[in-house]
Every structure is written in structure tokens, then in C-alpha cells.
Image (spheres, rainbow, N blue to C red):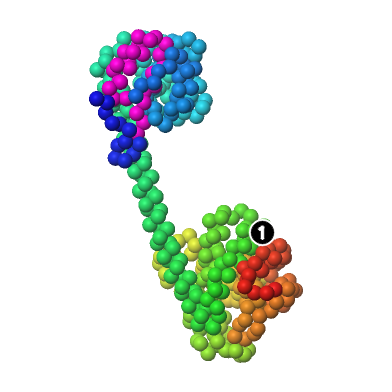
Amino acid sequence: MKLDVRKTGGIYMPDKILIVEDDEINRMVLSNIFGDSYDIIEAENGERGVELLLENIPSICAVLLDVVMPVMDGMRFLEEIHSLGWNGGIPVFLITSASDTDVLSRAYELGVMDVIAKPVVPYMVRRRVDSVIELFKARKRLRIRVEEQQQEIDAQARKIIDLNLGMIEALSTAVEFRSAESGSHVRRIHDITKTLLLDTELGVGLSYETIDMIATAAIMHDVGKIAIPDAILNKPGKLTKEEFDIMKTHTIRGGEFLERIPQLRAQEAFKYAYDIARHHHERFDGNGYPDGLKGQEIPLYVQAVSLADVYDALVNDRVYKKAYSFDEAARMIREGECGCFGPRLLGAFKAAEPKLRSLYQSREI
């Protein structure tokens, strides 16, 4: 009765042995030794062996290979499968009466697992081949289990990250509602920032994952407003100098707030979130706050968030103003009426602005 070796613990296992041997009697002997536990496929030379290997490679658990054969010998067989990218995933046993040390050395270099001398002793060859096949199966089971566990770990980590991001977005949205702004503002800042970095030359050199992290960090740009009194935050008229000085502290408070979240500090996104929260009101000419950074002292991703914040503020109603048209908002930004932005950022904005308008599909231009 043939053993069921196709599946072990729910994992598919190869169950075929390929015998590459020109002598029919030798093929019969080997087939009889292994035929009770494995499906046997036979090739009378190396060329046919390569064909059968490529046709059946997912199901082959071992190759029993002779050296001296017509058409293509065993060494050429090994060289051929090596050139095709065979990486030792299938154990190959050289079964031969040859004793040339150079041949055997070359065979091992090409990945042969073991050399078995002819004439074969059935119980010895069976034990040696079975042991190696079981070792390879155990390695496959272990590799698959490790991959499954890694996938489980990655899925759990993703859930935790999504939960944390959800909480951060909820907090940021709550801050926006508190300042009488639409909660969708933070989502638009995310989308505008991502578009500026992903669809223009601003993002050259940044991976998609990094751009995604920056866009997510942009959600927290105004988190420091949680420390600003309502009377100032929602004042419909112009702020006094004293009130504006208090309002400006939201950048410092935002950075301090983020620093106090240990789970966030452990994330790669923390650097982007901190820089954005603290510096998104810096100006390219150095007249911004809180640190008066100038030009390239301001990280480019922070500049992108700053412009995103200004653009969204212009094209939406605020407690202190009505929304401008897209054309007027774009003109005001280009001409420096709402901050000071560098030429590289303005060039990227000009290229991306038509697409930015599509983020406001519910509004008429």
C-alpha cells in the first residue's frame, strides 16, 4: 500500500522521485526500492531528465542521477539545471560506479546532496534517500510555518498601526471641530500632501512608504491647537498681538504633545509628525514661527504640508473668512499673498493644482 505523502499537516509535499538512468534494469531496481512510497518517473538520459524535471518540479522530492549516459550525461544534467536557476531545493543523489574524484568534486559543487555507489544496497539507499527527503520536507514545513507566523505578526502589527492611526486621526479631527472647522480638513491635508509628493518632482528619492508616512503625519499638523483657548481659537475677527502670540504656541505645544506619546515615538513616522507639527508655520523667507527657519532649513515635506494647509484654508470657509475660488487661491499662493514658499514648491504646486481641485469634487470651481 502506497503511503499518503502528498500532504503533511495540511501542507502539500512533493511525492515523486525522478530517476535519470540509461540502464533499464537499474531503473527497475531503483523503482522497486522506492515505488511503494513514491510516484516514480523515469528518464533514459539527462536531456529527457531535464524535460521531466521542468514539467514536474513542484511535485518532485528527489532526483536519482546516473553519471554515464548517452545524449546528455549526469554532469551536463547538473550543469543544465544549475544554469536554469536550480538552487538546491530538490535533493539530487548521484548513483554511480564512477570514482573519479574530479567528477565527484564537481558534482558536489553543482549541488549534489549525496553520492551512492553502484551496485546499490536496497535498504542502505532507501534509508539515505528517505532521511534526506524527510529533512527537506521538515525544512519546508518549518519555512512555511515561519512565513505564516510572520504574516500573522505583520497582520497584527498592521491592526495596531491602523488602530493608532485611527485614534490619532480622531483626535486631530476633534481639534478641527473644536476650532469650528470641518473634520474633513485633516483628511484633505493628508491627500494634498500625498499628491504633492507623489505626483511631482518633490517626492523624487522618497519611497511610496515614506510618502505615505509623511501624509499620515500631516494629519497631526495642528494637534497643538488642543492647548489654545476657545475664545482665541474661534474668534471671528482679527486676533490681537497678544492673542496671536498665544495662537502661535500651538506649534510648540503640538511637538511637545507628540513627544509625550511613547507609542508614537517608537514609530518611524514620529520624526515627520514632530517636524510638521512644530514647523508647518515657518516661511521660506525666515519670517515664520516658532523658530524662524529659512529656505532649505525647513524640510521639504514640511513645506509641502504648509502649502497644503494654506490651500485648503483658502478654498474653504473659516470662522474669519469665506472661501475663495480655486483660481483666486492659486493666484494668492503664487504671488505670495498667503505666506512665502520656495520656487521648487511653487513649481510643484502649479503642476499638481489641477489635480488638487479634484479632491473637492462636491464644490463648483
Q: Secondary structure at mark 1?
A: loop
Q: Is 188 left or right of 55, judged from the image as shown?
A: right
Frontmost residue, 247 versus 314: 314
Q: Residues within 10 Å of mark 1 (few under 14, many from 20)?
A: some
> Type of residue at label 1?
Thr
x and y, in percent, of residue 195 in the image: 62, 62
111 lies above or below 348? above
Furthest residue in direction front, as rendered: 1
Residue 173 higher or lower than 102, as above or below? below
Is 15 part of what is drawn in magenta?
yes
Q: x, y percentage for residue 320?
A: 62, 86
Compared to residue 46, the image places residue 199 above or below, namely below
Which residue is rendered at x = 27% and y = 26% of the image? 2
Residue range in magenta is 13-38
Residue 36 visible here: yes
Is 156 on the left-hand or right-hand side of 239? left
Q: Name the residue rendered at 50%, 11% in the picture.
A: 71
Pinpoint residue 131: horizontal percent, then vertical percent.
28, 26
Location of the N terminus by quadrant is top left
Quadrant location of the C terminus in the rendered image? bottom right
